[in-house]
Image (cartoon, helix red, strand yellow):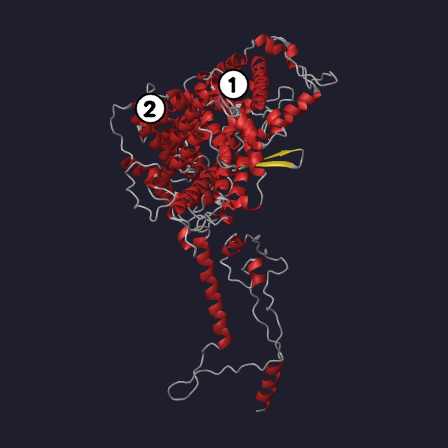
């Protein structure tokens, strides 16, 4: 009995130690006392955009704070064995502490099994592909750094990033062909590029006498207007070509104001800024036929007009800033500036201000939600303008590979109805019912596009959080939605034979605009995986190649004899300039993989397994065999046609000679029809030189003798080239300032192949 008491006394004073438990939650969830799903990053940290970090084994804090604690002050619970049916205690039964410990071990084992099964970083035991999509960071994003502090981000659709897919072509650029004559071609192209840039700078600079004048702004805007005949033509061109998916104006109302203005009647202050913006857009799309107008009064100086409109907008104050007409003018001015300059990042920044301006006016909420009723006419105009702003936001976000200003759920404004503008008038009491989507109206294109907006917003969101994807299912689901929308276009706008050329042109434009509106996000969705992921599903590989070829083949369905074909050809290449470049690089990637697959098949005949690169090559080959549209000869023909068109348009404002040169080198390196790719590249570069010289009206000899002099006239060379293969060694002399400018301008290309005065070096 005494022993039991002593034992009990010692038991009550013994040190009770809890089993050490390793910390499995991330530090942020543990600190904030949130439930952690133990992924990297975890869901809680993703929602709050915090840095997710786990404590490593052995690191301070890797053991729970409640472990190894002494609880001598508490009275221990007595472990009583359960009784049998006769009232006697059961023997050999584990105590409560042992049961808890056993349960804890089993729970930990289950958690470990679940984590191993669902972890995105582990492969299945059967050796199947990883569940997490693995896209190469080298082909997903890039950052240029100038002077240590100036930086700019580029996403997976930038040519600066896409060129990283082609090692041999990139090596050729860095080594500059290891040939003196190719080195001279690079120098000539550089000089052409600088000359074209200078011409573009002059062409896009406003006339100071109008911009800096003290004359009232309305008088200055009226002074830059062209003649009425030119205005009539450009306004009509804008209404037919641009007021389709981007609905800004009520056409009958604007045309009534337009006619009254030319009759001498005073109009509202916002009319001239809107008219100038419309004329700029129409004139830019009509640029190919500018020779039709013979005098200065028959054209409009776009940079001056845009600058005057901007001056008028900046002069608005107070209530003027929330006028609906002011927002319309802001949208038109943004569109005019966008077709004049190709700086997508600047447009994206300005669009953010425009979105917030619209939201402060309440356009993101449907007019039916407000207690004070908005007239049906103005309610419909608000829906059209808000949908236009959404379209611009989605498009510019994909072009810049940056998040959209608006996300799904941030607005409740409903899409507009499928109605003609002449069915709407300011004093109407009720809107007429919407027509079926098969019926052609002024708003049909925008209405159809609005129905696909949910899927396109998902694309913008997904490609900006691509590192957090767990599997391909979400990519495939969104891709299926967009491909279904593309299939619906065939039924909404069926191809019908018509003897009316204008009807044929209108049908083609409607179909292309609708198709382009869905194909752009589909290409942006598939591009990061199709061009760099070894485990991408075949649906992505095939769908991306087909979409590239369809986008590059839009003009093949249009008869060159239709009216205004030259203007349509010009407008097509102006509007889709960046998309055509992206698609061409994508096709070249497939050509490269198909050529490599021929060698890989021979090399892998004696092996049982295939590497990741061989899987990509096989997937690209399978995609090229899925349709005659994407056969290898067709791929070559299509990209070569793109290069020829770009060379033809080398003097156009917005043409990037750097992109043209890189695409040319990539194509002729991997097109596979010759065993001498360097010779093909040299001939193609010479065509670029010839086209540039012809556009500048200068001979190659005169260009070669041109030198870039600093104000001090000092000359310096970084290396001494071998003069034997060169025509004129003076052409390679450049000032130190010019060398620094050349290096700074093209350092964004992750290489100095543009600068023939730097020491040859390999890719960094």
Q: Position of residue 41 (x, y in %)?
A: 52, 52
714, above or below 115, in the image: above
Answer yes or no: is residue 358 visible: yes
Disc 2 is placed on an element classified as loop
Query: Label 1: few (<14), some or many (≥20) within 10 Å?
Result: few
Q: Position of residue 198 (x, y in %)?
A: 59, 21
Q: Which residue is mark 2?
A: 558
- Give 238 or 621, whichever is nearer the viewer: 238
Answer yes or no: is residue 618 visible: no
492, above or below 700, in the image: below
Q: Is residue 21 left or right of residue 553?
A: right
Q: Quadrant of residue 87?
A: bottom left
- Give 664 or 273, whichever is nearer the viewer: 273
Query: Label 2: few (<14), some or many (≥20) within 10 Å?
Result: some
Q: Is residue 439 left or right of residue 603?
A: left
Which quarter of the rendering shows the N terminus?
Answer: bottom right
Q: Which residue is mark 1?
A: 296
Q: Position of residue 137 (x, y in %)?
A: 52, 39
- Give 613 or 475, whichever is nearer the viewer: 475
Which quarter of the rendering shows the C terminus?
Answer: top right
Q: Position of residue 26 (x, y in %)?
A: 55, 57
């Amino acid at each position: 009995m005494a022993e039991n008491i002593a034992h009990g006394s010692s038991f009550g004073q013994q040190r009770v130690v809890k089993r050490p438990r390793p910390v499995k939650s991330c530090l942020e969830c543990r600190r904030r006392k949130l439930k952690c799903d133990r992924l990297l990053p975890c869901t809680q940290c993703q929602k709050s955009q915090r840095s997710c970090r786990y404590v490593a084994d052995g690191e301070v804090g890797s053991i729970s704070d409640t472990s190894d604690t002494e609880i001598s002050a508490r009275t221990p619970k007595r472990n009583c064995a359960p009784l049998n049916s006769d009232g006697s205690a059961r023997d050999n039964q584990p105590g409560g502490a042992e049961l808890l410990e056993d349960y804890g071990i089993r729970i930990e084992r289950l958690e470990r099994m679940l984590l191993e099964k669902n972890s995105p970083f582990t492969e299945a035991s059967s050796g199947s592909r990883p569940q997490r999509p693995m896209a190469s960071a080298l082909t997903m994003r890039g950052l240029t750094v100038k002077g240590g502090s100036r930086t700019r981000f580029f996403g997976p659709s930038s040519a600066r990033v896409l060129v990283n897919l082609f090692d041999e072509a990139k090596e050729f650029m860095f080594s500059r062909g290891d040939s003196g004559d190719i080195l001279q071609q690079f120098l000539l192209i550089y000089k052409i590029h600088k000359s074209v840039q200078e011409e573009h700078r002059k062409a896009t600079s406003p006339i100071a006498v109008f911009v800096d004048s003290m004359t009232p702004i309305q008088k200055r805007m009226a002074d830059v207007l062209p003649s009425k005949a030119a205005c009539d033509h450009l306004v009509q061109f804008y209404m037919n070509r641009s007021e389709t998916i981007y609905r800004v104006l009520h056409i009958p109302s604007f045309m009534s104001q337009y006619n009254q203005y030319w009759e001498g009647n005073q109009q509202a202050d916002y009319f001239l800024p809107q008219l100038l913006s419309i004329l700029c857009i129409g004139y830019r799309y009509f640029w190919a036929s500018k020779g039709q107008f013979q005098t200065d009064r028959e054209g409009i100086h776009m940079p001056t007009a845009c600058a005057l409109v901007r001056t008028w907008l900046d002069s608005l104050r107070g209530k003027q800033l929330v006028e609906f007409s002011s927002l319309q003018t802001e949208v038109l001015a943004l569109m005019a500036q966008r077709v004049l300059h190709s700086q997508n990042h600047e447009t994206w920044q300005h669009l953010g201000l425009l979105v917030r301006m619209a939201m402060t006016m309440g356009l993101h909420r449907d007019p039916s939600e407000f207690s004070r009723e908005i007239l049906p006419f103005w309610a419909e105009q608000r829906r059209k303008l808000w949908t236009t702003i959404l379209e611009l936001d989605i498009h510019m976000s994909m072009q810049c590979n940056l998040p959209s200003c608006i996300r799904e759920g941030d607005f409740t404004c409903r899409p507009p109805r499928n109605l003609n503008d002449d069915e709407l008038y300011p004093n109407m009491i009720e809107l007429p019912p919407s027509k079926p989507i098969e019926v052609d109206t002024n708003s049909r294109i925008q209405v159809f596009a609005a129905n696909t907006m949910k899927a396109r917003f998902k694309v913008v969101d997904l490609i900006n959080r691509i590192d957090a994807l767990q599997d391909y299912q979400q990519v495939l689901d969104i891709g299926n939605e967009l491909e279904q929308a593309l299939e619906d276009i065939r039924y909404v706008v069926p191809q019908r034979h018509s003897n009316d050329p204008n009807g044929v042109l209108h049908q083609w434009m409607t179909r292309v605009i609708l198709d382009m509106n869905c194909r752009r996000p589909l290409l942006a969705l598939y591009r990061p995986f199709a061009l760099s992921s070894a485990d991408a599903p075949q649906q992505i590989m095939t769908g991306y190649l087909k979409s590239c070829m369809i986008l590059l083949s839009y003009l093949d369905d249009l008869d060159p004899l239709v009216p205004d074909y030259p203007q349509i050809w010009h407008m097509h290449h102006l509007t889709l300039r960046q998309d055509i470049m992206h698609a061409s690089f994508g096709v070249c990637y497939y050509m490269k993989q198909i050529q490599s697959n021929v060698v890989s098949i021979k090399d892998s005949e004696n092996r049982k397994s295939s590497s990741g690169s061989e899987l990509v090559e096989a997937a690209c080959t399978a995609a090229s065999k899925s349709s005659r549209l994407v056969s290898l000869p067709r791929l070559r023909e299509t990209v070569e046609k793109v290069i020829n068109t770009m060379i033809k348009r080398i003097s156009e404002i917005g043409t990037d000679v750097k992109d043209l040169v890189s695409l040319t080198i990539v194509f002729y390196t991997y097109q596979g029809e010759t065993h001498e790719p360097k010779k093909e590249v040299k001939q193609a570069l010479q065509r670029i030189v010839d086209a540039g010289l012809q556009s500048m009206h200068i001979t190659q000899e005169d260009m070669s003798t041109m030198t870039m002099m600093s104000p001090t006239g000092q000359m310096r060379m970084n290396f001494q080239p071998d003069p034997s293969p060169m025509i004129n060694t003076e052409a390679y002399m450049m000032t130190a300032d010019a060398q620094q400018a050349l290096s700074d301008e093209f350092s964004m290309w992750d290489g100095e192949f543009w600068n023939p005065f730097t020491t040859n070096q390999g890719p960094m």
